[in-house]
Image (tube, rainbow, N blue to C red):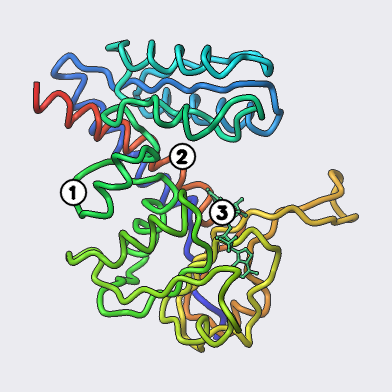
Amino acid sequence: MPAQIIDGKSIADQVRAEVSDRARQLQERGITPGIALLLVGDDPSSLSYVRSKGDKAEKAGLFSEFIQMPEDTSESNVIARVQALNADDRFHGILVQLPLPKQVSEDRVIAAIDPDKDADGVTTTNLGRLMRGEPCPWPATPTGIVELLHRSGHLPAKKHVVVCGRSNIVGKPIANILMQKNDRANATVTICHTGTVDLSTFTKQADILITAIGSARTITSDMVKPGAVVIDVGNNWIEDSSRKSGRRLVGDVDYESVSQVASAITPVPGGVGPMTIAMLLSNTVWLAEHHTRSD
Ligand SMILES: NC(=O)c1ccc[n+]([C@@H]2O[C@H](COP(=O)([O-])OP(=O)(O)OC[C@H]3O[C@@H](n4cnc5c(N)ncnc54)[C@H](OP(=O)(O)O)[C@@H]3O)[C@@H](O)[C@H]2O)c1
């Protein structure tokens, strides 16, 4: 039987509707949650992604401001702008769109973000809080994965989750989130990477397989346990002469074959991708709620 499709678009719609309600409740108390979206350069895909974040923020009842700095901006100017945003009370969340131009260190810019305005949960402080199981904004993509699992009825507790990929924005945080001792997590987690010998030995043991490797259709049906739940984070462009653009987006998973053995699977596009923006907005509202509670 073909796998259940976990529909990220409709789950993201639900999350955004809830974000909108929470934003309205804050507005009734005179607080408009605000997010600053900082882009350095004019890369077309980053530009369109940031604009989409701003658009969806406004539609959910948040205030958003898009700040674009020229490609050749110095690192100190980018950091100075982040510090100005830290001090600007209109913003509860700050998002610096990555990647940054080569003269600007991502690590130093991220370190400049006030952890209490860290909308994407990328600062060292928030990743440390996440690891310790303390309340904080989590990176948006892993948070989206957690929501996809729960809202589609695939609870991770007591399951064996295998994560392929150990980046700071996906692999490490999702593994840390799902291993925590609480009702929404409590999984046994294995992490694989390029140092893993015989990847399929591990992927075949997964009740829930999460792939974030950035390698097109690498996970094939023989690598997946029948009945597994498969969450495909990968976004990979491949050539496709049948498309006007000459290319199309695929995941890390070979969807056609894996959807015949998995019990549930996220499509690419339309799975994890739409959740990332929704969770960024949710994080921003959480920061506004959290900040105003402690005032
Ligand atoms: N949908 C979304 O919203 C969203 C958000 C973020 C990322 N993504 C996509 O998710 C993918 C991963 O992104 P990322 O930023 O996490 O990637 P990344 O920083 O490039 O990290 C890739 C990870 O995968 C591991 N890896 C690569 N090839 C492998 C293989 N054949 N077998 C086992 N492990 C392998 C690497 O191992 P080493 O550590 O050993 O190098 C690394 O840990 C990309 O396609 C990206 O576009 C999507």
Q: Which residue is mark 2?
A: 277
Q: What residue is shown with label 1? A: 134
Picture residue at 50% right of the left edge, 47% below the top: 274
Whether residues under marks 2 and 1 lie with C-beta atoms below 8 angstroms apart, the answer is no
- Residue 211 picture quarter: bottom right
Q: Is residue 107 left or right of residue 113?
A: right
Q: Of callouts 2 and 1, which one flags the residue occurring earlier in the amino acid sequence?
A: 1
- In the rendered structure, which amino acid carries the disc numbered 3? Gly
Disc 2 from disc 1: Cα separation:
23 Å
Badge 2 element: helix
Q: How far across and down, in percent of the image, does residue 286 sit?
A: 24, 35
Task: Tell me the element at label 1.
Answer: loop
Residues at marks 1 and 3 touching, judged by CB atoms closer than 8 Å: no
Residue mark closest to the camera, 3 vs 2? 2
* Vertical comparison of 117 with 271: above or below: above
Q: Is mark 3 within 8 Å of ligand 1?
A: no
Few, some or many C-alpha atoms within 10 Å of disc 2 (few <14, some 14-19, many ≥20)? Answer: many
- Looking at this view, is 105 or 241 the one in front? 105
Q: Earlier in the sequence, mark 3 or mark 2?
A: 3
Which amino acid, mark 2?
A: Ile
Which label belongs to residue 270? 3
Tell me the CA gap for discs 3 and 2: 12 Å
Residue 11 at x, y = what percent?
41, 52
Disc on the earlier residue, 1 or 3:
1
